Image (cartoon, rainbow, N blue to C red):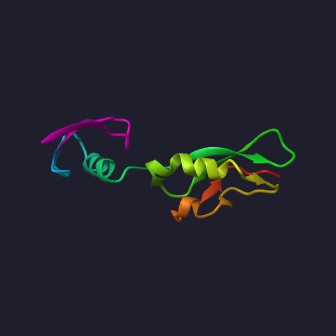
Amino acid sequence: MEERELICINCPMGCRMKATLEGGTITSVTGFTCKRGETYAREELTRPVRMVTALVRVKGRAQPLPVKTDRPIDKDLIFDALAALGHVTVQPPIRIGEVVLANVCGTCANFVATANVR
């Protein structure tokens, strides 16, 4: 039997939870105050994912463009996704929501612009 401690990041409550695992299977989760906490703990221990935010170069500009993934990607792919984004330079104009890098690391997630550039 193994116990893991987690802090939920789904809301400002920051519940401190304990998950019990037996043979790699989650048998119980305690310490959450809402259902989202239990769901977070189970997902975090089986397949952790994150939204990723970053900056990309804009041709002819000193100020970079903020971007984010349009869906969470596996946590172990974050550095690969950022490395792929490091080769991107966008050309104005760019609109909010425009895809800057599609299908990041084969995940079906896209990096999209979070600001307009004229």
**Left or right of 99, for residue 21:** left
Work out whether residue 69 or residue 114 is closer to the camera in this orientation and state it.
69
Work out whether residue 90 or residue 88 is closer to the camera in this orientation and state it.
88
14 in magenta: yes
**Left or right of 97, for residue 89:** right
Work out whether residue 4 or residue 15 is closer to the camera in this orientation and state it.
4
Q: Quadrant of the N terminus?
A: top left
92 in magenta: no
Rendered location of residue 78, percent (x, y): 52, 48
| Figure disc tally | 0
**Left or right of 29, for residue 89:** right
Q: Residue at x 60, y 47 (%)?
A: 82
Rendered location of residue 105, percent (x, y): 55, 59
**Left or right of 118, for residue 46:** left
The answer to whether residue 109 is above or below residue 21 is below
Rendered location of residue 60, percent (x, y): 87, 46
Question: Is residue 90 visible from the viewing direction of this image?
Answer: yes
Rendered location of residue 115, percent (x, y): 70, 49
Q: Residue at x 65, y 59 (%)?
A: 101
Q: Residue at x 73, y 57 (%)?
A: 95
Q: Residue at x 37, y 44 (%)?
A: 10
Question: Is residue 50 visible from the viewing direction of this image?
Answer: no
Instruction: Report the magenta residues as a range.
Output: 1-20
